[in-house]
Image (tube, rainbow, N blue to C red):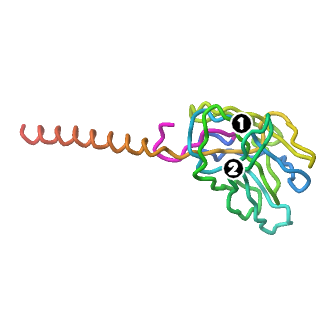
Amino acid sequence: MSAVQAQVVFGNLGPNGGGPLSNDNIDTDTMPLAAGFMAGASDTLGSVTLGLYNLNGGNATPTTVSIHSDASGFPGTAIQTSAAVNVGNKGLYTFSLSGVNLTGGDVYYIVLNNGASWYYAGSGTTFTAATGQNGSGYVDMGSYSSSGSGWSMDGAGTLSLSISVVPEPHEYAMMAGAGMVGFAVWRRRAQRAAKA
């Protein structure tokens, strides 16, 4: 990543993570759900945004998501679980998973843990598959559900999802260096113009 701020690297909600939700959803009260992806580079995870709504008839529901490692093509061990976010009406909800280091080429899974219905991305009843965003090289590894006896793959990753990463410290240093060079060039030109 060569960004200077958190940037969307994967999902189906567009390059800025604010795309539309379809009219269809799947409830997590009957089965856990997951979306898989392969990291395109070694990055530090910042946040995950999902299209959700609550299952409690209008009452906000505390909901968490986890990022899991890969276990032979299915969600494995939880690496980190987010703080609870109160999910209410249909909308986009962002969960912080900051500090998780992703390794390029490794597979990870975002698991919706409780109390919400997960919308598909798209328009109406046309679903949009997740892809790498902003030239990241991230790859969709599908959608998954668990009936209690284990995970099964349901197909392409069409559950609404947007994954953002934060820049590495060396990227801040590169930007600071570029800023200093730009300032030096500007100052030199200003001094020459003043002498003329």
- The stretch drawn in magenta includes residue 6: yes
The magenta region covers 1-12
170 magenta-colored: no
Residue at image coords 77%, 37%: 157
Write the residue at 70% across / 36% down.
107
Foreground pick, 43 / 56: 43
The numbered mark, 2 or 1, whose residue comes first in the sequence reads 2
Determine crowd level at label 2: few under 14, some 14-19, many 20+ residues with C-alpha closer than 10 A. Answer: some
Q: Secondary structure at mark 1?
A: loop
Neighbours of disc 1 within 10 Å: few (<14), some (14-19), many (20+):
many
**Quadrant, the C terminus:** top left
> Residue 189 is drawn in which quadrant?
top left
Residue 170 x/y as whole percent: 42, 42
Q: Position of residue 112 (x, y in %)?
A: 78, 52
The kind of residue tagged 2 is Ile
For the residues carrying marks 2 and 1, which lies nearer the camera in this image?
Answer: 2
Q: Mark 1 — residue?
A: 130
Residue 116's x, y, as percent? 81, 57
Which numbered marker is on residue 39? none
125 or 67: nearer the viewer: 67
Tag 1: amino acid = Ala
Q: Residue at x 73, y 65 (%)?
A: 86
Which image quarter: residue 57?
bottom right
Count of marks placed on residues? 2
Mark number displayed over residue 79: 2
Answer with the quarter of the image where residue 52 lies.
bottom right
Q: Provide the secondary structure element on which disc 2 rests.
A: strand
Cα separation between marks 2 and 1: 22 Å
**Position of 33 compared to 105: left or right?**
right
